[in-house]
Image (cartoon, grey):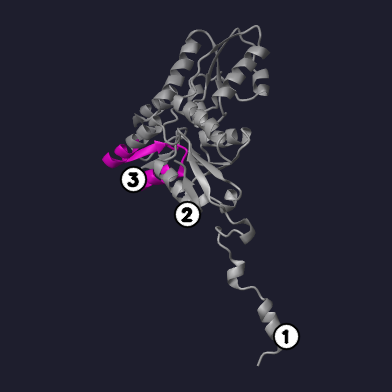
């Protein structure tokens, strides 16, 4: 027979159930109230990414193919392509195991494409047409005698593609970068296609301000799908308490959407899949907005909406 002391010890010992709580557990005092789900008017996969994905899947079905990098910055898409049999290589590497190699939606310099062709590979180009437009704009500015400047994230594959044929090109993303530009008579400026449009125009004006004796020729190469998603986000942020951005961890435009939402005074979280949602985010959120980057599959967004519904959300009419 157990003593009263032993019974007291056993009674006070927490059960496994009280120690190992699921991620969905919310203390009773902070239960999630019913909330509205609002979708942005423009979100998710753009036509350039959709076409690149279709081309990559077609190539993998017809034979062996190596994608030279990440087709798009989205792990769900990459897993889908690996399942289809596509290999993933390095655009700036020295070899690929397959004869056919595929340039990603982010594009590549003519130098890199020619280098792979000279190695004996069949080069399939899945570059987004709007990225190609940016390449053409920069080449035209250089042909006009301009010093090339790209507004974008240094090291990003799209930016490396834009500057790859112009070794003297400068990449800028801050006022300090602009102050450090070498004096030039003519600056020719383009942008990475997924940069925030308002920020790009601010940086162009800063180039003019810090280099008043230079002529600045600017070609707006921020793509229309990016602009549409950014405008839709501004509208969404005015309506909701929390914004959830669905997009890959290394997706520049998904990161920019989350950062923009925060600058607009709205709480925001970027997630890759529905499983990343933390129910605690939903506390005191009467209205939750959902948007997605240009490399995000529609099915991923649908799964996020479904997950929010299980947590008490209802899609607004």
Q: Is residue 267 magenta?
A: no
Asked if marks 2 and 3 touch (Cβ < 8 Å), the reply is no
Q: Which residue occupies the foreground of this view, 34 or 64? A: 34
* First to last magenta residue range: 56-84
Query: How packed is label 2: few (under 14 Cα within 10 Å), some, or many (20 or more)?
Result: few
Which label sits in the foreground, 2 or 3?
2
**Residue 77, above or below 131:** below
Quadrant hosting residue 56: top left
Q: Earlier in the sequence, mark 1 or mark 3?
A: 1
Q: Earlier in the sequence, mark 1 or mark 2?
A: 1
User: In the rendered image, which residue does mark 3 sit on?
Assistant: 84
How far is the residue under mark 1 from the one under mark 2? Answer: 44 Å
User: Can you name the residue that lies furthest to the bottom here?
Assistant: 1
Kindly identify which numbered label has been placed on residue 310.
Answer: 2
Which label sits in the foreground, 1 or 2?
2
Q: Percent x, y for residue 40? A: 48, 36
User: In the rendered image, which residue does mark 1 sit on?
Assistant: 5
Q: Is residue 247 visible?
A: no
Q: Which residue occupies the foreground of this view, 63 or 277? A: 277
Q: Is residue 238 visible?
A: yes
Query: How packed is label 3: few (under 14 Cα within 10 Å), some, or many (20 or more)?
Result: some
How far is the residue under mark 2 from the one under mark 3? Answer: 31 Å
Please state the total of marks drawn on the protein image.
3
Q: Percent x, y for residue 134? A: 46, 20
Quadrant hosting residue 77: top left
How far is the residue under mark 1 from the one under mark 3? Answer: 64 Å
Kindly identify which numbered label has been placed on residue 200.
Answer: none
Q: Secondary structure at mark 3?
A: helix
Which label sits in the foreground, 1 or 3?
1
Q: Which residue occupies the foreground of this view, 76 or 268? A: 268
Q: Percent x, y for residue 202? A: 61, 20
């Amino acid at each position: 027979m157990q003593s009263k002391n032993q019974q007291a010890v056993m009674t006070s010992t927490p059960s496994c159930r009280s120690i190992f709580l699921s991620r969905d557990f919310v203390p009773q005092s902070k239960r999630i109230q019913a909330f509205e789900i609002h979708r942005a008017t423009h979100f998710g996969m753009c036509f350039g990414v959709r076409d690149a994905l279709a081309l990559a899947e077609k190539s993998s079905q017809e034979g062996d193919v190596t994608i030279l990098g990440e087709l798009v910055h989205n792990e769900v898409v990459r897993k889908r392509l690996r399942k289809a049999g596509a290999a993933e290589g390095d655009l700036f590497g020295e070899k690929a195991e397959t004869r056919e190699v595929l340039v990603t939606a982010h594009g590549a310099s003519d130098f890199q494409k020619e280098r792979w062709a000279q190695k004996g590979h069949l080069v399939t180009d899945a570059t987004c047409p709007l990225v190609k437009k940016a390449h053409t704009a920069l080449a035209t500015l250089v042909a006009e005698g301009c010093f090339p400047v790209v507004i974008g994230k240094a090291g990003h594959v799209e930016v490396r593609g834009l500057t790859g044929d112009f070794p003297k090109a400068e990449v800028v993303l801050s006022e300090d970068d602009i102050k450090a530009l070498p004096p030039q008579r003519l600056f020719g400026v383009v942008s990475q296609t997924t940069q925030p449009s308002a920020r790009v125009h601010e940086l162009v004006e800063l180039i003019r301000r810090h280099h008043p004796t230079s002529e600045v020729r600017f070609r707006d190469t921020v793509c229309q799908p990016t602009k549409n998603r950014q405008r839709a986000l501004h509208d969404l942020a005015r309506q909701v308490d929390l914004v959830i951005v669905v997009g890959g961890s290394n997706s520049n435009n998904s990161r920019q959407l989350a950062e923009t939402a925060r600058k607009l005074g709205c709480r925001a979280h970027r997630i890759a899949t529905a499983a990343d949602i933390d129910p605690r985010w939903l506390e005191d959120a009467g209205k939750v907005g959902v948007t997605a980057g240009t490399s995000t599959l529609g099915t991923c967004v649908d799964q996020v909406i479904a997950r929010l519904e299980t947590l008490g959300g209802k899609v607004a009419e």
